[in-house]
Amino acid sequence: MYYLKLIVKNVFRAKLRSSLTIIGLVIAIVAFGLLQTVVDAWFAGSNASSASRMVTRNAISLVFPMPTYYRERMRAVNGVKSVTLLNWFGGIYKEPKNFFPQFAVDHENFFDLYSEFLMPDEQLLAFKRDRQGAAVGRKLADEFGWKIGDTIPIRGTIFPGTWNFTLRAIFDAKDETTVTRQMYFHWDYINEYLKQKYPRRTDQIGTFVIEVNDPSRVADIAKAIDAEFKNSLAETLTESEKSFQLGFIAQMEQIILTIRIVSFVVIFIIMAVVANTMAMTARERLTEYATLKALGFSPAFVAALIFGEAIALSLIGGGLGILLTFPLAKAVGIIAAAVFAVFKVSQATVLMQLACALVVGVAAALVPSWRSARIKIVDGLRHVG
Amino acid sequence: MTASVNTPDRNTGTLVEIRHLAKSYTRGDQIVPVLYDISLEIARGDFISLMGPSGSGKSTLLNLIAGIDKPDSGILRVDGEDITQLSEGQLADWRASNIGFIFQFYNLMPVLTAFENVELPLQLTNLSRAERRERVEMTLSLVGLADRMEHYPNELSGGQQQRVAIARAIVTDPTILVCDEPTGDLDKQSASDVLGMLKQLNEEMGKTIIMVTHDAHAAEAAKRMVHLEKGELIGEPVAGK
């Protein structure tokens, strides 16, 4: 207790210097936490993927569709439990800045495959019965203040015209990794329109979502599905839902890598700042350390005092930084809602922040404690701080 | 020239025995001798002042006796133990048990109260918290600072700070008190008080005191005065007043 008190008192001895160092630490730890959360946000979709779901797309590119009749042949593949349709719509709600993902899906069974979306049975039924019906996630509904029964006009970019949807269901997330900032509606509604206006585009789908009986057989089943369509008009590429999601992230790989590097550079910079603070502190206190050694305290004790002070300083700054990360992440999540559907500080990020603070403290104390512990008592007593 | 002073005229026995002690420092490529062939005996219960001009080696001799520096050659026995043979760790333990330090600039920990400063060396003992408290309170009362226990050094005058330093030096009941210019930073009245306190500790509590000083008046408080010049002991010891 006595030593702890001594360490804490030493931390706040040079109030201005300690305060500035702590502020620097807070900024660095917050920046690190937010940057890590940005990286996590990129991976949020893939982390929420189901191991029992696969996605099939055109082998050439995602922009090329496949005939919907493939579905029946997919169902026949051993291990396939069910197949549903999913097509990117890419429409605009009022203004482009209101971006959110919209998908045309097979209304009959889509939500059977996505058990992480929770909604009342009567709403699901209403969604299925209404050809213009739409289901949206809670976050999206809250963001635009939509209520059941509201009409949502979406201006198509891939599918021309203005499409009016009636909100029939609002789904909630099973857990916090589930994204609820998207909209689903009937693929039939789109397809019927295409039949009238653009007959050559009908009965084509961007992706099939496949549910398998045994997640451990995903690789074999994917191979079997793709073999089924080998040498056909539209060859397929089937992969796990996670791989499919990661494929999108891979396009951002360099950006994500840069963000990761920057987050650690921030920590490295603050490490240099804290090391400088500790070096100045230790140099000023050489006479005190020499006095302690003269009184009979060991060099290890002197080193422990400096380590204790550096770690206390880092933990105070780190702790405040961690606490501040949560409200700031919430604010960033609201501002960047259109980019990141899930922007939550993960437990892993908090642990990394804490570890960074500790590493900064230990690294900053290494050289000053080594020098102070080794100083000869007579030299230290002669030193003028 | 070999100088020796071997006149512990007390029947209490020799506490510090120095034989042919030499010490030099290295500055760059140069070896600078500081002490030459010093032989000296200090009796238990003695109060000796080491005098001499700057650079005479008096502080170096004090540091060697206190075990915070090591000689190049010679024998230095304290209470029969040759401290030149002790390792750094053993010397630290030895100092904690045997030496009380009083410095010119007090060397108190500025973030600790007077009480906590005096308690500091007791942290190296096995005393309980209650025992430590009792000892610290008693010692601070002894130096007349019972009412200043919770004051920080910067809230005390120079004389009071030096009295806290004296309390810190004696709280572990060490064998020897080593004082390096203990009145060098004090006004006349405070210096007189501190010297009076040292005399009291020597006469009433039997503490052996070795004091380095420039000040002839301060040196007279000691029972014996020893002069050093250019690293050598000069003449015979002179009795104090």
Image (cartoon, coloured by chain):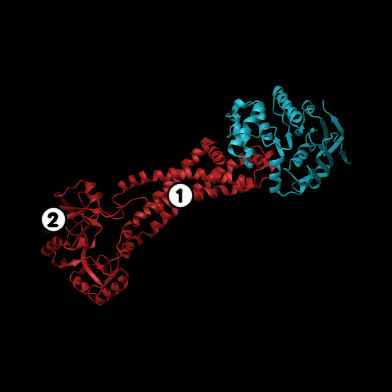
Tag 2–tag 1 contact (CB < 8 Å): no
* x then y, percent, for residue A114: 24, 60
Is residue A362 positioned above or below B113 on the image? below
Is residue A368 positioned above or below A234 on the image? above
Residue extending farthest to the bottom is A231
Residue displayed at 41% across by 57% down: A257
Q: Is residue B105 visible?
A: no
* x then y, percent, for residue A189: 13, 60
Quadrant in the picture for residue A74: bottom left
Disc 1: which chain? A
Label 2 element class: helix
Res. B21 mark = none
Label 2 to label 1: alpha-carbon separation: 49 Å
Q: Is residue B70 visible?
A: yes
* x then y, percent, for residue A324: 40, 43
Q: How many marks?
A: 2
Residue displayed at 34% across by 54% down: A41
Q: Are marks 2 and 1 on the same chain?
A: yes
Q: Nearer the viewer, residue A207 or A148?
A: A148
Residue underneath mark 2: A126
Q: Residues within 10 Å of mark 2 (few under 14, many from 20)?
A: some
Q: Amino acid at mark 2?
A: Ala
Residue underneath mark 1: A354
Residue A332 falls left or right of residue B209: left
Label 1 element class: helix
Residue extending farthest to the left is A196
Quarter the C terminus of chain A occupies: top right
* x then y, percent, for residue A321: 43, 44
Is residue B170 positioned above or below A242 on the image? above
Q: The chain drawn red is chain what?
A: A
Q: Amino acid at mark 1?
A: Leu
Q: The chain drawn cyan is chain what?
A: B
